[in-house]
Image (cartoon, rainbow, N blue to C red):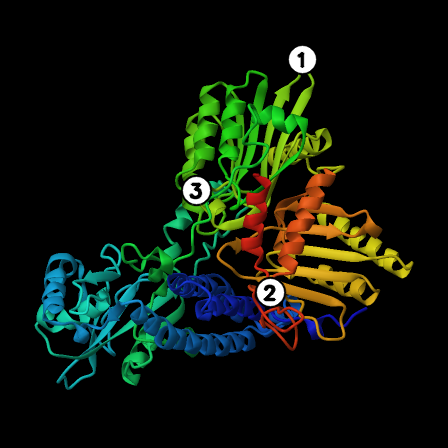
Amino acid sequence: MLNLQMSLIARDISWLHFNARVLQEATDKSVPLYERIKFLAIYSSNLDEFYRVRVSSLRQFKKLTKEERRRFFDFKPKKELKAIRKMVSKQQEEFGRIFREEILPGLEEENIKLLHYQELNKEQSNFARQYFDDEIASHLESKDLPVEGEADFPFIKNRHLYLAVDLANDEDERMLLVNVPSPPVSRFVVLPKDKKGNYCVCFVDSIIRANLERHLGLKIDGAYSFKLSRDAEMYIDNEFDGDLKEKIEKSLSNRDDGLPTRCLYDANMPKWMRKALKDRLELSKYDLIPGARYHNFMDFFGFPLPEGREDLIYPEYPPLPHPRLERAESLIKAIQRSDHLLHFPYQRYDYVPALIREAADTPSVKRIQITLYRVASKSNVVTNLLYALKRGKKVEVFVEAKARFDEASNLFWGKELEKAGARVQYSFPAVKVHTKLLHIVQKDEDGSNIHLSYVGTGNFNEKTAKLYGDHALLTSHPGIGEDIAKVFDLLRGRLILPNCNHLLVAPFNMQSEFLQMIDNEIKIAKDGGNGFLFLKMNSLEEETMIEKIREAAAAGVEVRLIVRGICRLVPDDGENIQIISIIDRFLEHARIFIFGNNGNEKVFMGSADWMNRNLHRRVEVITPIYDPTLQLELRHLMDMQWRDNTKARLIHERKNNEYQVNQDGERGNFRAQEDMYRYFERKMD
């Protein structure tokens, strides 16, 4: 038995290493300037969610007794919180350095200036003053707060910006609390150009600072921004009792009222003011994170781009037509003739809602079944399901109402489908339904069922299909279709155990089947054959799978892993394991599993990462790819990613997050996402 615990990195520390890779993109000069700004925004958004979800959980663990912690957990929450704070503080310093020393000078080189209020010329100052009076002042709220005493502290909204204002010439230490109303006001104000013709932008909070004394009629010594992140967990007391959907709906309104998990503040804030915020908000020292003058860098997703400066962003990669489906008169007939793979965002997503619409118009189609995990706010998929109901089709939908931060959208569409006559089911207690399935049942002339199936790695979401790297199988394979029918029977409560002959279904046979296939590679290697594992996933965390990977590597199996996010397995020089992580313009989201099988490769894909939650607490589906041509295509795409030496980073004990280089020690020969787009372009010829 391997000494696993000694060589596993903590899950949350591994996640912070992933977010550091995001931060690397912001300092990469080969990335267009506005995209580097966007990566700062992504880093900030990621970190905020991390504190709202993961750090809030660690805070809850701290409340357990020592005996309870020893019994159920193999880590010390307080120790891990300290490690997190240390890493985050270091990353925040790097974040500030990148912004000050790289982004701002880069903007100036492009004749774009992000100005503080005191840097404005007379025309700009007059414009900003008028803008404050016309657009900002009516949205400002302020409250005079004594540092100590009985006075109620106002509620600090989640992820909203505030200014803690130091009142001048006051014998007692007092402060004002002033909101930064963005939204509804834009965070960035475009000013008149300066005399040199520079495109000039100012933070709205800078304009507020400059006008506060006039607005309040008070003398102030300083105004320091801070932002609070709150626990995002909904804390449903008992998921097994009563209507879970109704409980989720009620809990949603309370989410933004959760306990504070992080207070990001201007490092120049006076110590007495910082202490007052800490005491009045009941924060611990681990919740306080010093930062720069400006916070809420998520707002940089909307940093204004000067007209005609598309050179500052990535060139467009318009989604391409699928070479066979685009020419097909009928998607249904094309799928009945052969299997197809769709690759997003490189190829068009339109085929998915179009397939549902064609099914709605096909008399022999009797039933449409689908799982919805994260639904777009404007969804052609749901629109065409509603159309199918109007055409008299039976539509069965499983809506996962516990998809964090998408609960409201999912519940909305679930209700719309219910009103239109669909059979809609919602979340199960203690389990999430994360699989991405579409099942169309057609009646043949002899009365038998024809199954048209879609198994994807990504959600039925038109918006993310333009941003996430995902794959989907379209097949009429009867065995796969029958297995998918069993999964939907499980979701309807008709089955307790889906005995599938083709699909790997969590939390039932998936892990055992994966372990058996790795054991087969171990046997092949021990018998002198070519044992091979080539796996891609978002996260690798589940300890049994990690132990089995290490066992395989020790037995001589060649192990290649592509892991975007959490990776608790960090190999050293003595292990026969290579791991890379690719961070680029599109979010790598696919899960692909290739087993060498002594030259007769087995290829699988689907919705599940190798995490505890995916293998044990979620309904997930992994499908085999049977078509040899499609197997080769997925293998070719994986090979393109493996050779990436532009955006691939190493996950390794000594070289963690170093860029992968070619044999000459250089970067830049291969870039997987660009190579894949060109590959799909060539397939159109």
Residue furthest to the front: 685
Element on which disc 2 rests: loop
Q: Residue 281: x percent and y percent?
A: 34, 71
Judge from the rendering whether residue 403 lies leftward or rightward of residue 41; answer left or right. right
| Residue type (three-letter) at the residue carrying disc 1 | Glu
Residue hosting label 3: 376
**Image point 61% across, 54% down: which residue?**
613
- Label number found at residue 603: none
Quadrant (top left/top right/bottom left/bottom right) for the C terminus:
top right
Mark sitting earlier along the chain (1/3): 3
| Residue type (three-letter) at the residue carrying disc 2 | Asn
Q: Can see residue 406?
A: yes
Mark sitting earlier along the chain (2/3): 3
Tag 3: Cα neighbours inside 10 Å, few (<14), some, or many (≥20)?
Answer: many
- Label number found at residue 445: 1
Mark sitting earlier along the chain (1/2): 1
Quadrant (top left/top right/bottom left/bottom right) for the N terminus:
bottom right
Task: Examine the rendered structure and indicate whether residue 476 appears above or below residue 120.
Answer: above
For the residue pair 323 and 589, the one nearer the viewer reads as: 323
Task: Examine the rendered structure and indicate whether residue 420 appears above or below residue 272.
Answer: above
Q: Residue 413: x percent and y percent?
A: 43, 36
For the residue pair 563 and 244, the one nearer the viewer reads as: 563
Residue contact at pointers 1 and 3, CB within 8 angstroms: no
Residue hosting label 2: 645
The CA span between labels 1 and 2 is 54 Å
Residue furthest to the top: 445
